Image: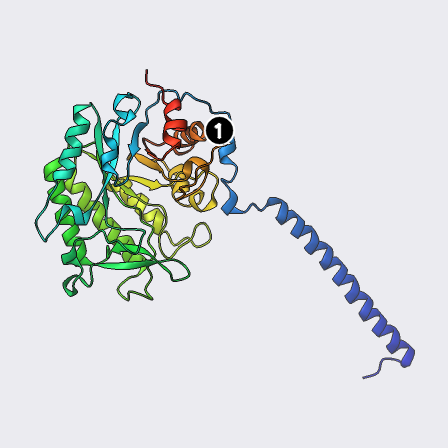
Amino acid sequence: MSFGGKGTFFYFLIGIHWRDKMKCIALSIICTVLSLTTRAEWENPSERYAEAYTEFLDATCPVVQDDIHHFVYFSRDRGAIHNHPLLKNARFEGAQIMYSWAQLEPSKGHYDFSIIQEDYDYLAAHGKRLFLQLQDATFDPKYKAVPGYLLTAEYDGGAILQRTDSGDPEGWVAKRWSPAVQARFAQLLTALGAAFDGKIEGINLQESAIGVSQEFDPSFTPVRYVESLKTNMLALKKAFPHSTTMQYANFMPGEWLPWEDKGYLRAVYQYGEQIGVGLGAPDLMIQRKAQLNHALAMMHEYSYHVPLGIAVQDGNYIGQTGSNEVVDERENLVPMLHAFAKDFLKLKYMFWVNQKPYFEQDVLPCFVSE
């Protein structure tokens, strides 16, 4: 092949290099323009609700009467309902109290609901109602919430240790995905319903978030866990056709929204709407992405006929979770939390934790009894 001599060959090479250079420059300009355009148009989906709370910064006390059913949450401190200010405040309809499965079924098939009846009677005598939370999980490795008979081979151990992301123990949870455990749980719900359906205001199952993986229990899978929650929700609805029923659904093992959306949490919310079981969650954290992208997003983005509820729990009054810290100099978040729950989430139930000094100093002044 001939290129017509050295000079022609040289200029041919120069031409090739020049054309390549121009192509690179053009491509670089196009890529830069596309990058800037995409960056301007792209919004991080995990931050889509990060500023939603700012719409409610001007909320003030007292909180105006609305359609939300307000209850005071006592966790397992049931004795604190006695002579509590809620008894004389018409804005609070009653108390939400947690009872463990172990308390209610001390031995297999033997049920003892006397403490529930005692609390029900006391509240009723003061014109207040009981909302029952059924506990099958704990957040302290020293305590289990299930009856001792379940902790046997017949029920595959009955409960499993919950672990943090780093593998540290953080509590126990019933093996909700075990058919044998589900059957016993359904029996408990049936017995509770026979005694209290239509009498108590409502009953809720504990949160869906658990620290369990297949690494520590081969029988566990995220998909199986979704189906187990549905099984328990249906048993709850059958046992309590008249009282309000609710599943707390905040996070699900095996997904992290919005980046890892397997449809697990969404499936729980859709199923609750389908069978008439309300949906709720612990921790009204209106500035934390984790809550905003999970339970709060599920509540905000869809329309429901079933009631939605939220628990304002320990630490939430100062924008934290699970905190016992006392902050003397603080902004009262109660009016903003209420406004957010009412207008952004469209809730029907709010459960305000009886945490000192916040309940007395921040909540009560906002709920003036008329």
Q: How is the structure coloured here? A: rainbow
Q: At which x and y percent is residue 304?
A: 32, 35
Q: Residue at x 39, y 29 (%)?
A: 342
* The one of 240 and 154 positioned closer to us in this rendering: 154
**336 over 263 or under it: above or below:** above
**Of residues 142 and 202, the one drawn nearer to the viewer in this rendering:** 142
Q: Quadrant of the N terminus?
A: bottom right
Q: Position of residue 202 (x, y in %)?
A: 22, 35
- What residue is shown at x 33% (from left), y 66% (from top)? 215
Look at mark 1 in the image and give the residue it sits on: 56
> Farthest top residue?
370
Residue 54 x, y percent position in the rendering: 52, 32
Residue 159 located left or right of residue 252: left
Q: Nearer the viewer, residue 37 or 309?
A: 309
Q: Evaluate whether residue 281 shows in this view.
A: yes
Q: Is residue 199 visible?
A: no
User: For residue 367, what is the image quadrant?
Assistant: top left
- SS category of the residue bearing label 1: helix
Give the quadrant of the C terminus. top left
| Horizontal arrangement in the rendering, residue 255 relative to residue 217 (left or right) | right
Q: Is residue 167 above or below residue 119?
A: below
| Crowd around label 1: few <14 · some 14–19 · many ≥20 (10 Å) | some
Kind of residue at badge 1: Phe
**Image coordinates for residue 248, horizontal then vertical, percent:** 30, 43
Q: Residue 193 occupies which quadrant of the picture?
A: top left
Residue under the image location 41 percent in, 43 percent down: 323
